Amino acid sequence: MNTNQVNQIVGQTNHYLDQLASAPSLLLVLLSCLIIGWVLKALPKFPNAAIPMVVVLAGVILVMLVQPERPATLSVRVFRTRGAMIGLIIGFASWALHYYVLYRLESLPWFAGVFKSQSASSFSPLGTNPKFSTGGGIYVPPAAQPPASPKPPQRTSLT
């Protein structure tokens, strides 16, 4: 690479970073929650079932940190409660965005092997019922099997 190419790459990188820095704070919180979830999912010792809770709590904490100054006409209690509720919504939205949309991207070749020890989703809203699939909350009935026919009684020898 020559210096012109390096300068062009650095200039483009700075341009994208400036655009990211000017993004709305709630969008940055949403993206941060997604990244936190992906990092936790990549840790083999971290339980998948705990990821949604951590992501939602991270949303609450991050919104509380980035929210603007409290208006003088608004009480502290209402201001903090409003921030916590927005954080809950943003954290849940990041989990839902991952669960219903982005986890499908993880099957692409450039994600291969990153999440090999984990399932496609960190939490199923349908629970652990085996008759349900965890593929986006869509009901998948079990395979149709004919009823088992009764077995004839076995003969035993009396001798």
Image (cartoon, rainbow, N blue to C red):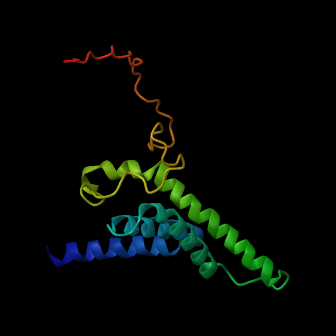
Q: Is residue 93 left or right of residue 147?
A: right
Q: How many marks?
A: 0
Q: Residue at x 47, y 36 (%)?
A: 131
Q: Which residue is at the front of the view, 155 or 30?
A: 155
Q: Residue at x 51, y 54 (%)?
A: 97
The percent position of residue 56, horizontal first and vertical second, equals 56, 67
Q: Which residue is at the front of the view, 138 or 70?
A: 138
Q: Residue at x 47, y 52 (%)?
A: 99
Residue that lies at the very extreme toward the front in this rendered image: 159
Quarter of the image where the C terminus is located: top left
The percent position of residue 34, horizontal first and vertical second, equals 46, 64
Quarter of the image where the N terminus is located: bottom left
Q: Relative to residue 158, is residue 35 depicted above or below?
A: below
Q: Is residue 59 left or right of residue 82?
A: left
Residue 17 in which image quadrant: bottom left
Q: Which residue is at the front of the view, 4 or 108?
A: 108
Q: Is residue 67 left or right of residue 143?
A: right
The percent position of residue 91, horizontal first and vertical second, equals 57, 65
Residue 4 in which image quadrant: bottom left
Residue that lies at the very extreme toward the right in this rendered image: 73
Q: Residue at x 57, y 58 (%)?
A: 93
Q: Which residue is at the front of the view, 149 or 13?
A: 149
Residue 8 in which image quadrant: bottom left
The percent position of residue 54, horizontal first and vertical second, equals 51, 70
Q: Relative to residue 78, is residue 156 depicted above or below?
A: above
Q: Is residue 121 left or right of residue 154?
A: right
